Image (tube, helix red, strand yellow):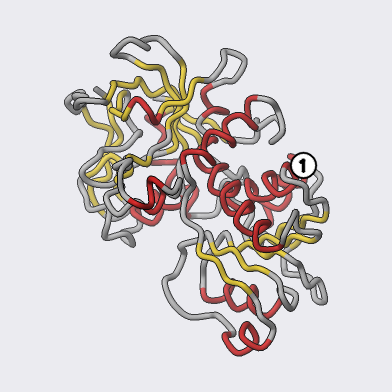
Amino acid sequence: MKALVYTGERTLELRQMPDPIPKPGEVLVRVDAVGICGSDIHAYLGHDERRPAPLILGHEVAGTIASGPRTGQRVTVNPLATCGICPACREGRDNLCPDRQIISMPPREGGFAEFITSPERNLIAIPDTVSAPVACLAEPLACGWHAVKLGNRVLGGPAARVLILGGGAIGFGAALAARALGSTDITIVEPNAIRRRRLTEIDDFPVVEHAPSGHAPDLLIDAAGFATTREVASETVRPGGVILHIGLGQATNGLNIRRMTLQEITFIGTYTYTQGDFEECAAAIIDGRLGRCDWTDIRSLSEGAAAFAEIVGNAIASPKVVLLP
């Protein structure tokens, strides 16, 4: 099969690779569309020791089942493979399974290729009315869906005022999820001017360069995850409010722990989604609750290396680049 292989820092090569072979309980999936995630960019830059070269990256996949009794069915793929029997899995928190694996991280090769293998239970059917570039957004949008549900649970209902730091796919997706789950006052902070312009073309969320002073949101979502954004989050959220930390830009520093303690601010690290969250998010895409989802920049897999370089250079306005193998 054809695959875009990460071979070293800032290096991707289009290669011929052996077709993957499904294990028991798995099926072969032909990849029809795959998104570029921030974690793929971290690996590309050499910042993710969990993804050593050489490796096929990419975990935001929609495709068509190519083996087994469901052959020919169009699906979106939950890339988290979990054990199903540990306490976390039995409690419905399978994203915390200690034995979880994710495609694009050893031992599972990723979706920047013509085929992947996946546990059959991870495949969610999509109707013909939903294109593959839209269906592959179920993965990044499910991250925001999961996070907003956690925050609303602490607040006792939909947050009245939401501030989101970062207007990439995770941050923008969190805004879409917050609106679908009942919030109405939602603002996105995005420092990149070309992305700010693009976001205002896509939807009517207020998009600003800096966190507004005196805003004091009930729910603050850090979709970037740097020391500077954590500092803004912990100094901006209202007393008794909630910070949802999704971004993984930088591992340490930034929080104003004194203010968080004195103002009883809840900080939640939020990782991916549960299978239930993924299914709910896919259903919300299918029935239109998350909008048209037609805001991606679509490229061929052969243009993947150039797309990575453009993303790193802040030259792409859209929140998401989707590759078509």
Q: Which residue is the site of mark 1?
A: 203
Mark 1 burial class by Cα count in 10 Å: few <14, some 14-19, many 20+: few
| Residue 298, percent from left and from top | 53, 31
Against 8, is 102 above or below? above
Left or right of 223 on screen, residue 49: left
Q: Residue at x 64, y 53 (%)?
A: 148
Determine the secondary structure under disc 1.
loop
Q: Residue at x 75, y 75 (%)?
A: 238
Residue type highlighted by circle 1: Asp
Q: Say which quarter of the image contains residue 102.
A: top left
Residue 199 position within the rendered picture, expressed as x and y whole percent measured from the top left? 71, 46
Q: Look at the image and tell me in which quarter the C terminus lies.
A: top left
Residue in the picture at 49% in, 47% down = 273
Residue 266: image x %, image y %?
61, 72
Give x and y (percent) for residue 258.
60, 90
Q: Residue at x 72, y 57 (%)?
A: 188
Q: How many numbered marks have been drawn onto this rendered protein structure?
A: 1
Residue nearest the viewer, comparing 180 with 251: 180
173 relative to 112, above or below: below
Q: Quadrant of the N terminus?
A: top left
Against 240, residue 322 (above or below) is above
Q: Nearer the viewer, residue 210 or 143?
A: 143
